[in-house]
Amino acid sequence: MFIDHARIFVKAGNGGSGHVSFRREKFVPRGGPSGGDGGHGGHVIFIASNSATTLLDLRYQRHFTASSGERGQKSNCHGSNGLAVEIHVPVGTLVKIEETGETLVDLIADGQTFVVAEGGKGGKGNARYATSTNQAPYDFEPGIPGIERWLNLELKLLADVGLVGFPNAGKSTLISSISSAHPEIGSYPFTTLRPHLGVVEGIAAPSFVVADIPGLIEGAHEGKGLGIQFLKHIQRTALLLYLIDITEWIEEDPIVSFNTLRNELQAFDPTLLERPFAIAATKTDSQGEGQHLQTLQAYCLQHEYPCFPLSAVTRDGLPSLITYLEQAVMENKASCKNS
């Protein structure tokens, strides 16, 4: 099951209190203070991992508590520090404090770590309070409580290219044809019920990642169909690829289909319309007389939109599309480095 949001409670360990004790040595009737410091409480740490793909586990275990530091010991012995709790989450996880909505961290790299709750510091023992005028202090410092808070986690997949289209537009077939991803494919709406990532091996450059999300329908921003709950997974993509079905039995004008998709994206996040994009006219192996394809190509030519007729089944047009996406991703990464 794919889960992209979770709510959890984290509690760092408390610091151990300092100890009060005095040396008891032979021939030293009045030994000085020897109370040790308390140990520090354990942190709660998030670790981003490419091996994790969902927040499902955090739906079943929602409370995480690190151990507290031990109290200081006699003979100036320091109390043991508490053990940290490590929570592994998928790369792309956004962590927010529930109470304030403040974003703590956006975990976007494999192996990235972040302390979401710091353990309390251990208190000082009475040995720390000895002075020339107070050689036998009974003072000590209690440990500081660890941080505790409720957190909201949101997973946004990381990809270079995001596929956008209506149900059964051919997104799953395309991603399975150009990458190693194998989503369920069927000739009925809403075959894809969760996002998928596919790694495409470039022809002249390193590989890039494509994200396939469940299909949209008109009114998705109002909750129709599967709604827009998965659109957040293309918010991080640098390039969008709109898939328009141009088979002969599709009654809707392909231009209307394209503009409907754009309207749904705008209703969710207006900045998505600012992303570079291309249009893929899918299922050319079933285009009939090709009227829909001609209409779409003329529209793209008029507006100077990149358009790629293709068939994921026969693989016609796929090399040209991959070359274009590869180049667009390379240019985006180059511009990001220079900015």
Image (cartoon, rainbow, N blue to C red):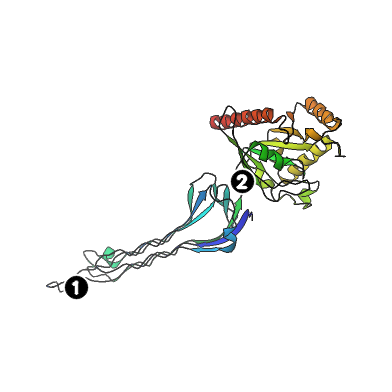
Please state if 45 lies on the left or on the right of 328 as rendered.
left
Asked whether the residues under the numbered discs 1 and 2 touch, taking CB atoms below 8 Å apart as contact, a structural biologist would say: no
- Mark closer to the observer (1, 2): 2
Give residue 296's mark: none
Give how far across and how far down residue 5 sits, in percent.
62, 55
Q: Residues within 10 Å of mark 1 (few under 14, many from 20)?
A: some
Work out which quarter of the rendered image holds the C terminus and state it: top right
Q: Nearer the viewer, residue 152 or 146?
A: 152
Q: Name the residue at the left extreme.
A: 27
The disc labelled 1 sits on which kind of residue? Arg
Q: Residue at x 80, y 41 (%)?
A: 260
The kind of secondary structure element at disc 1 is loop
Task: Give the residue pinned by disc 2.
Answer: 157
Please state if 324 lies on the left or on the right of 134 as rendered.
right
Q: Quadrant of residue 250?
A: top right
The disc labelled 2 sits on which kind of residue? Leu
Q: Quadrant of residue 320?
A: top right
Residue 98 visible to the viewer? no
Please state if 252 lies on the left or on the right of 62 as rendered.
right
Q: Looking at the picture, does residue 279 appear above or below residue 213?
A: above
Q: Nearer the viewer, residue 20 or 184?
A: 184
Task: Give the residue pinned by disc 1.
Answer: 24
Q: Nearer the viewer, residue 22 or 333?
A: 333
Give how far across and how far down residue 149 sits, in percent.
53, 61
The kind of secondary structure element at disc 2 is loop
Q: Looking at the picture, does residue 189 appear above or below residue 130?
A: above
